Amino acid sequence: MNKTKLSQDENLSFKVSHQLLPQDYQRIDLYFSLPVEMGINPSTLNEEEFFYSNIKNHSAYYADQLHLPLVRSRFVSQKKGEQSDYRLNLNLYSYQVKKALDADIKQTLKLKAAEEFYPAAVELAEQTLSLTKKLRRYTPSDKKLNSFFENADNYLSWHIEQSFLKLLSRGPKSSEFTAERELLLSLCRSENDYRIENKYNSQVTLDDANRITNKMRLLQRLIEYGVVFQRKTRYLNVNLKRFVRGVVTAVIMAFVMLLVLNARTNFTEVTVALVAFLGLIYGLRETFKEDLTSLIWRKIQKGRPKWQNLFTHSVTKKRILSQILWLEYISNKDLPKSVNALFQQRRQQNKQAAQLLHFRCDNKVMAKEFLPGYDEIQQQTFFNLTPFVRFLKKGAGRLYSLEGQKISSQGVEQRYQINLILRHFCKGEESLQRFKITLNRSEIVNIESIN
């Protein structure tokens, strides 16, 4: 069964990742148990605002073994296919190299012993050099194709340099591996000299850290063309919401007109009392119309899907993936039995009053097959928890301790814990996993998977 992974993304965000096969169907449910003391409820955090601002979806072709490029060197030859084929194949190769390098850099940084770290880093450098040689072996002569090549080559060269500099700055320091460290630094210097020699970036851009970084972000988006799918989000209940608003308005107006007609029969002429009564009627209409509409709409919308994401291939414009999405506050009685049972396994001190928030995503792959070399696509959903910490306290005072005759103190911060259950349906099988997300006002401190 295809497992779903939940991991931290940035300081206050995490991501849920899973893979999809051609014509596959999978369902993802996330149940957030938010402590009442965090102040999160329908009055303080609107579901729709949270969805549009803090939940993002990303879908792209995926390779399981990222350190082995799936796109062979022949794919980046300008002699194979038309101009659109060249750009797509070039992007596939470049994107794969970037993903491979990012994954291997992350794995290498986990090696804390210098005896393991530097040999792995040197091997990674050799593999990277081999991949860039394959790319640069096929420098196109056609000016139309050359711009695509220069963009990809410029970005990869810069990304390689930045990746290895980060690797060296965060890796263990040891005087016994001076030669290996110098080899890695020479790779960074050679990539920098390569870009200067080819005049990929102007001196003005190089002198400004913000300009060069923003330019590389642009080039990164360019190499994602044809690999990362384009997303279009559609609100599903627009017409139903209009219908509900219209019916509520019609009913209220009919009631108001009935009161007005009765008032005219009781008042034979226009008086101050008549004017005041009509003003009161119309004031009550305006006061209760929105509240009544919101109440009825929330009852009707409960349990209904709210959005649809359509992912299309940026080159062929064919639909690849469709997502149906839910996001709503629920009560304990709405929890499935399996999810509720898992929540009940918490220790007694953790069973505090909480607000439940439910996110659901149904994924359906419409494509019968993917591009050559790719058997899966990766779907990632990013959740930004910044709105969750809006009402949190900055600190919880000081902790005092006695050491002999001396009293010392240190500042302590107040932390909050969100219990989260991830439920995954795939091919008739269900898997459940509980996580504890510990956070303060500035970051997610820890994400712990509970067995």
Image (tube, rainbow, N blue to C red):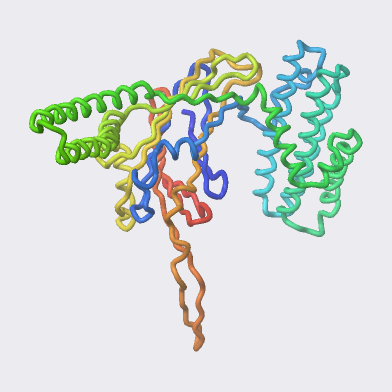
Nearest the eye: 43 or 421? 43
Left or right position of 352 against 59: left
The furthest residue to the right: 197
Left or right position of 313 against 186: left
Give the quarter of the image for residue 424. Answer: top left
Is the residue 310 above or below the residue 105 in the image?
A: above
The furthest residue to the left: 266
Is residue 29 visible in the rendered structure shown here? Answer: yes
Q: How many marks?
A: 0
x and y, in percent, of residue 268 in the image: 9, 31
Nearest the eye: 77 or 183? 77
x and y, in percent, of residue 100 in the image: 69, 34
Residue ID at (62%, 21%):
374
Quadrant location of the C terminus? top left
The furthest residue to the top: 81
x and y, in percent, of residue 6 in the image: 50, 40
Residue ID at (66%, 21%):
226
Left or right position of 112 against 398: right
Give the quarter of the image for residue 113. Answer: bottom right
Is the residue 395 above or below the residue 106 in the image?
A: below
Nearest the eye: 59 or 26? 59
Residue ID at (85%, 34%):
200
Is residue 431 visible in the rendered structure shown here? Answer: no
Residue ID at (50%, 52%):
446
x and y, in percent, of residue 7 in the image: 53, 43
Left or right position of 444 against 82: left
